[in-house]
Image (spheres, helix red, strand yellow):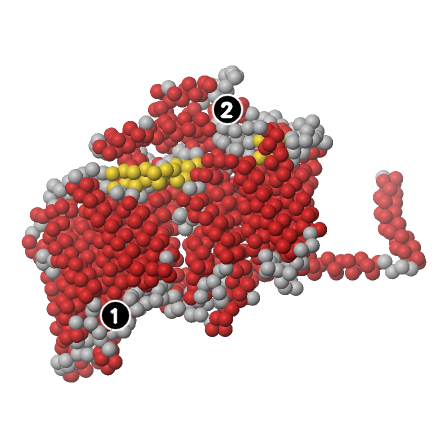
């Protein structure tokens, strides 16, 4: 594929939203505003899909300097898009048109609102696409500017000012230590570049001691934990959600929360591997508290938006738990939850917005029995509620399940508590759905009730499709991020990987020579008969799994998997006494 | 064909649900019924091919979720266990669809109702045909949601809302165990495919595979079984997690017949039978299974004695019969459990649908104390219900006789303490079963009319559709035991082939029950007959005032009366399970959510330390600081002087000290 086209596409992912937001401010008529907004956001979505389409497992990422533009150092890349960041860009650009559609005719300052949303989109794309710690920090903060306006100006009640302050101050407060850490890294290594920092920080005899790295990890963690939000820092979120207008909540829940977890995944874990492992019990504790404690709080909320907001905190608890399980299963699950939460909680906020437009209140005691007058809406609301409680078949389930599996291998107690959270999530999600949709209809509101109109259907339906599609076929995401996960988990020289390999007791006989292919010896060994026996034992004792996750080559993993399945199926055939169909199955697997 | 039988109910649900406004109630119910009927016909073929011809079928479609070692396919496994379940599910479902078209014909939401029913059938089929645990979990949760929707079908009633949420949440407690069990299975086997797990399970039993949890060393296989069984307890309403089942009777009666009697609640039994290779290898976990099953059988039967709601009696009866199946599984007697499952599906559906016919005829009155003498109004329903009751209590040569007696006899035949325990409780439960069945029959049909006049004057005939459905189920209840006995539990039957695994070293072979003395074999029948006759005689004497007044007076004065009242209260309060759960589990959690986490922390401590604290302290500090800036030059000069003194004085002091030293 021609590199220039992709460079141009990546550049336009940032420029199109920014320029169109500027253009919106100068357009006079409302029709123009709507047309420009929808057109540019759909165009951006198309471009992001284009980039997503060029991702293949064999060509994992693009590192691109479109303008040959290097103002800090020679090897400074402007754009970088691997599977994970492209995924989040696609999610962002998928949600923005939906937001723009949802504000049409429901708010006063539609022009400024749309401009703020597009500006936000541009900044968020920068966060996901630019491999530079300092610029990451800058855009991490600059997201607050449009968000401040969306909540503080477009919100509905006078408390909105307080909520906007809280959002801004909390994030600023959290990210001050992160800024110091970034500057410290620059002082030591003389670069802000992501790739260089990753390599330098993971050197065997690096110039930072492990204690320093742990402090730096904490500083980064402060910034991200506020944004995620993790439990002691979470109270800005319900406030902000309640005061924000519908589209603001959608962006907040759908994308802004993901910036925190994306930061943990992209910066904390690859930069400070040992520290991440060291602090993972702390993260488990915070995540468990987030899951149980906020779920219990959710049960007693009376504001519909607060229910969804608190449940977001609980879901983010699953994400952080999965990320710091540091197994590829757990992290893959965490990413799936992030994406799925982007669909589901956004859709729930949109649903609440739909009924808010009719009732003009969000306190649940005014709601009852809307299933009688809004059947189509109730079906949609039901599906998203079920997704919220993690029903299999919806997109939340594979993620939660993978997180539980991944955490179970590392810390069973944490995963037990996480599973306990699913009981509570059923309780609050069903209770909310039941109070809104079922029960006897309150006669005061009969005249205001009408089923969803075309506009509302069109912004809910894509989310519905996505929720069900990724529930039935989550591999669409998993295949794309698989390689990048291995990269994140095993960054550093291949020598490092090899040394970790060798520390695992029973495989120490594998020798590594410094040939062109660092795994050539290993591959030969893998194909030998002696290994098959060894491997069979190791898989059963659960050691092999960790080894596999350390490799960064896809072929290696598939090699392991082939052997693994081959052996097991044959085994199954023997023990089951030669069942015909089983034998057939075993042959197919070979 | 194997896939068509799966997808057909889903298509039926989608068409009847989303096009319900265009098709109308009649049209959509015809579509849904036909789609399930089609799937039933396909199941018959599958039953022939897989069950009788022994050709197990395994279809893999495409990968569902795969991440490093975790790889799950959409795969479907049709072995004898699955095919028997297919027959049970699709046949009962077809009949219930047909029944509902008549039962619900005056309901404006008929199309929504049949759509839910088909939707449920689809998930139930997914549950039984999945070839891995994740797909089982999908079906498991899917039927839970369908059950939630169906219990909540008349959604304007607050009782229906409460019961529906309760059903889902209590089931989630069971799913808690199931999900953890699946996680542990993956942790141990690194796969979730049935074939691989069952084939390699013995290895993990022979070696010392332990799981460290909170400092304890727990045997992994036992722990897996225990956790999976928690899931079964939730779905199959075993004691402790049974509370949702009686409340679920708020739903329409066809739902109770399909979901809460014949199919969904048997999913727990299905899970255990499906995992027989795992459960065979367990030690303490299988004792736990026996204990819970036997306790449930007795508990539910005893509670059923004093219930006054027609449907609740049958619901407790279901619960009790599920207890039989579960302890039979614990005794490694899987095929008998499955046999009972099949028979139970027929006669319990018959009982429920018969009860539905009565309830429908008298405009939704469910309290048995307000019924009576319906034998004159609807003799046909009476004969159906009596037939169902007789089959339930195990009257000779009806279906329950063949399966329930086998279960009780094998529990006698296993020489373990837990088996004897289950034998005794099973007999007691058999007595109670007969007692409440005939109490139900007497109060509803034979007793003098006890209801309001308009109940009887508005009595309308049972429609021909309902009569047809009841007749089919009658035939099933009469002959399913006799016909299927040799196939399912006969000596040397190879019907189950590989799908049920029996460890020859584990328990006494269950076919030994053929050789136990006739006197023992007669005990269950004796229990049943005595229960039935006692109940009928007692009620007859009581209601016809034939008990001497002196006897009643002396009884009410004696200490036995207090005891009697105590026992009846205890049973009437359903062993106080709901009370304990409400007061000691639900309320504390809700209070914690409000008082501790919301008020004390979120709106208290965290906010005081965080934003409120800052907004309280910062203005005050700045006010204090602003006092310093008075604007007068002499004020500033004095402060500068003061500062100088404060800085120089200690310095000079220290300097002087140093000089002196």
To which chain does the residue with label 1 belong?
Answer: B
Drawn side of residue B260 relative to residue B660, left or right:
left
As helix, strand or loop, the secondary structure at mark 2 comes to helix
User: In the orientation shown, which residue stands out farthest toward the left?
Assistant: B518
Q: Where is residue A373 in the image (x, y as percent from the top left)?
A: 44, 66
Q: Is residue A149 visible?
A: no
Q: Which residue is drawn at 38% across and 47% down?
A: B179
Residue B169 tag number: none
Q: In which quarter of the image is residue B1?
A: top left
The residues bearing labels 2 and 1 have C-alpha atoms spaced at a distance of 74 Å
Q: Please state which of residues B568 and B396 is positioned toward the viewer in this rendering.
A: B396
Q: Name the residue under label 2.
A: A498
Q: Quadrant of residue A161?
A: bottom right
Q: Which residue is drawn at 50% across and 73% down?
A: A444
Q: Where is residue B598 in the image (x, y as percent from the top left)?
A: 54, 60
**Position of B564 relative to B124 (above/below):** below
Q: Please state which of residues A72 and B26 is positioned toward the viewer in this rendering.
A: B26
Q: Mark 1 points at which residue?
A: B360
Q: How crowded is mark 2: few (under 14 residues within 10 Å), some or many (20 or more)?
A: some
Drawn side of residue A148 relative to residue B320, left or right:
right
């Amino acid at each position: 594929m021609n590199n220039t086209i992709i460079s141009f596409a990546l550049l336009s992912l940032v420029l199109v939203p920014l320029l169109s937001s500027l253009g919106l401010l100068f357009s006079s008529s409302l029709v123009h505003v709507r047309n420009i907004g929808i057109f540019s956001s759909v165009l951006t979505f198309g471009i992001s899909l284009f980039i997503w389409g060029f991702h293949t497992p064999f060509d994992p990422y693009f590192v691109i300097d479109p303008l040959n533009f290097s103002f800090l150092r020679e090897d400074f890349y402007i754009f970088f898009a691997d599977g994970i960041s492209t995924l989040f860009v696609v999610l962002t650009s998928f949600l923005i048109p939906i937001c723009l559609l949802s504000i049409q005719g429901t708010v006063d300052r539609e022009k400024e609102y749309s401009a703020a949303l597009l500006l936000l989109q541009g900044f968020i794309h920068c966060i996901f696409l630019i491999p530079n710690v300092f610029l990451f920090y800058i855009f991490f903060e600059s997201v607050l500017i449009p968000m401040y306006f969306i909540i503080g100006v477009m919100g509905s009640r006078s408390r909105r000012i307080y909520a906007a302050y809280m959002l801004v101050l909390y994030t600023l407060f959290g990210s001050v230590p992160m800024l110091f850490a970034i500057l410290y890294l620059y002082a030591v290594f003389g670069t802000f570049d992501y790739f260089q920092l990753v390599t330098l920080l993971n050197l065997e005899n690096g110039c930072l001691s492990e204690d320093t790295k742990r402090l730096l990890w904490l500083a980064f963690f402060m910034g991200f934990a506020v944004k995620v939000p993790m439990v002691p820092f979470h109270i800005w979120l319900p406030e902000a959600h309640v005061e924000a207008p519908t589209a603001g909540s959608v962006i907040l829940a759908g994308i802004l929360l993901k910036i925190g977890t994306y930061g943990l995944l992209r910066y904390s874990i690859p930069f400070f591997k040992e520290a991440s492992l060291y602090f993972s019990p702390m993260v488990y504790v915070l995540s468990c508290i987030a899951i149980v404690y906020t779920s219990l709080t959710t049960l007693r909320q009376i504001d519909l938006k607060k229910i969804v907001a608190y449940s977001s905190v609980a879901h983010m608890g699953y994400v952080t738990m999965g990320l710091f399980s540091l197994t590829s299963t757990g992290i893959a699950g965490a990413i799936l939850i992030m994406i799925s939460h982007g669909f589901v909680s956004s859709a729930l906020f949109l649903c609440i917005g739909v009924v808010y437009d009719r009732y003009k209140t969000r306190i649940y005691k005014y709601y009852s029995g809307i299933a009688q007058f809004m059947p189509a809406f109730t079906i949609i609301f039901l599906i998203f509620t079920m997704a919220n409680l993690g029903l299999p078949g919806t997109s939340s389930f594979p993620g939660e399940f993978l997180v539980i599996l991944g955490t179970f291998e590392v810390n069973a107690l944490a995963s037990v508590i996480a599973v306990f959270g699913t009981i509570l999530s059923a309780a609050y999600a069903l209770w909310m759905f039941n109070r809104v949709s079922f029960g006897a209809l309150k006669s005061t509101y009969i005249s205001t009730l009408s089923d969803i109109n075309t506009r509302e259907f069109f912004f809910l339906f894509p989310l519905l499709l996505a929720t069900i599609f990724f529930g039935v076929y989550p591999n669409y995401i998993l295949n794309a991020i698989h390689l990048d996960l291995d990269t994140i988990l095993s960054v550093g020289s291949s020598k490092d990987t090899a040394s970790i390999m060798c520390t695992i007791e029973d495989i120490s006989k594998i020798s590594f020579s410094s040939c062109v292919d660092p795994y050539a010896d290993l591959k030969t060994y893998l194909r030998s008969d002696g290994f098959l026996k060894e491997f069979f034992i190791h898989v059963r004792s659960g050691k092999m799994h960790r080894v596999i996750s350390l490799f960064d080559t896809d072929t290696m993993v598939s090699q392991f998997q082939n052997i693994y399945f081959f052996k097991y199926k044959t085994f199954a055939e023997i023990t089951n006494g030669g069942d015909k169909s089983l034998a057939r199955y075993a042959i197919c697997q070979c | 064909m194997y896939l068509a039988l799966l997808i057909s109910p889903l298509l039926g649900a989608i068409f009847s649900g989303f096009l319900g406004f265009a098709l109308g109630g009649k049209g959509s119910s015809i579509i849904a019924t036909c789609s399930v009927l089609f799937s039933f016909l396909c199941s018959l073929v599958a039953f022939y091919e897989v069950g009788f011809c022994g050709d197990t079928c395994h279809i893999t479609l495409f990968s569902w979720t795969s991440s490093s070692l975790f790889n799950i396919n959409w795969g479907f496994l049709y072995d004898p266990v699955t095919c028997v379940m297919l027959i049970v599910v699709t046949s009962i479902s077809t009949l219930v669809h047909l029944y509902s078209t008549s039962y619900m014909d005056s309901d404006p939401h008929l199309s929504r109702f049949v759509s839910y029913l088909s939707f449920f059938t689809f998930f139930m089929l997914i549950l039984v045909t999945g070839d891995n645990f994740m797909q089982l979990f999908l079906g498991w949760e899917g039927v839970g949601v369908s059950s939630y929707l169906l219990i909540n079908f008349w959604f304007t009633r607050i009782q229906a809302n409460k019961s529906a949420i309760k059903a889902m949440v209590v089931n989630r407690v069971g799913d808690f165990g199931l999900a953890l069990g699946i996680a542990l299975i993956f942790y141990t086997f690194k796969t979730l495919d049935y074939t691989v797990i069952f084939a390699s399970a013995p290895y993990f039993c022979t070696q010392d595979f332990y799981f460290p949890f909170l400092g304890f060393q727990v045997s992994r296989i036992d722990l897996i079984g225990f956790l999976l069984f928690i899931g079964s307890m939730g779905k199959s309403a075993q004691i402790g997690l049974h509370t949702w089942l009686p409340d679920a009777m708020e739903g329409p009666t066809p739902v109770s017949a399909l979901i809460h009697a014949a199919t969904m609640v048997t999913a727990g039994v299905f899970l255990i039978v499906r995992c027989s290779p795992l459960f065979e290898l367990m030690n303490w976990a299988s004792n736990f299974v026996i204990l819970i099953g036997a306790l449930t059988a007795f508990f539910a039967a005893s509670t059923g004695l004093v219930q006054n709601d027609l449907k609740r009696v049958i619901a407790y009866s279901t619960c009790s019969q599920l207890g039989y199946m579960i302890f039979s599984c614990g005794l490694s007697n899987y095929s008998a459990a499955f046999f009972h499952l099949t028979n139970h599906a027929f006669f319990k559906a018959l009982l429920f649908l018969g009860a539905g016919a009565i309830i429908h005829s008298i405009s939704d009155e469910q309290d048995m104390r307000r019924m009576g003498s319906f034998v004159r109004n609807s003799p046909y329903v009476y004969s159906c219900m009596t037939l169902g009751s007789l089959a339930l209590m195990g009257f000779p040569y009806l279906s329950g006789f063949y399966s329930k007696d086998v279960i009780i006899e094998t529990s006698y035949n296993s020489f373990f303490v837990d088996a004897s325990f289950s034998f005794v409780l099973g007999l007691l439960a058999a007595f109670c079963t007969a007692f409440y069945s005939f109490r139900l029959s007497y109060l509803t049909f034979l007793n003098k009319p006890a209801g309001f006049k308009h109940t009887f004057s508005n009595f309308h005939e049972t429609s021909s559709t309902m009569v047809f459905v009841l007749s089919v189920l009658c035939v099933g209840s009469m002959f399913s035991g006799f016909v299927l006995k040799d196939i399912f539990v006969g000596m040397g039957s190879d019907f189950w082939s590989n799908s049920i695994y029996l460890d020859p070293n584990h328990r006494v072979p269950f076919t030994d029950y053929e050789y136990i003395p006739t006197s023992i074999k007669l005990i269950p029948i004796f229990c049943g007959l005595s229960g039935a006759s006692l109940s009928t005689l007692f009620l007859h004497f009581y209601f016809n005032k034939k008990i001497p007044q002196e006897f009643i007076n002396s009884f009410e004065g004696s200490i036995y009366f207090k005891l009697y009242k105590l026992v009846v209260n205890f049973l009437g309060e359903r062993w106080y399970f709901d009370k304990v759960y409400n007061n000691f589990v639900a309320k504390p959690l809700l209070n914690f959510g409000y008082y501790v986490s919301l008020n004390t922390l979120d709106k208290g401590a965290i906010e005081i330390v965080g934003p409120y604290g800052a907004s309280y302290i910062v203005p005050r500090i700045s006010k204090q600081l602003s006092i310093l800036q008075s604007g007068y030059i002499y004020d500033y000069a004095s402060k500068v002087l003061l500062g100088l003194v404060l800085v120089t004085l200690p310095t000079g002091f220290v300097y002087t000290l140093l000089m002196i030293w």
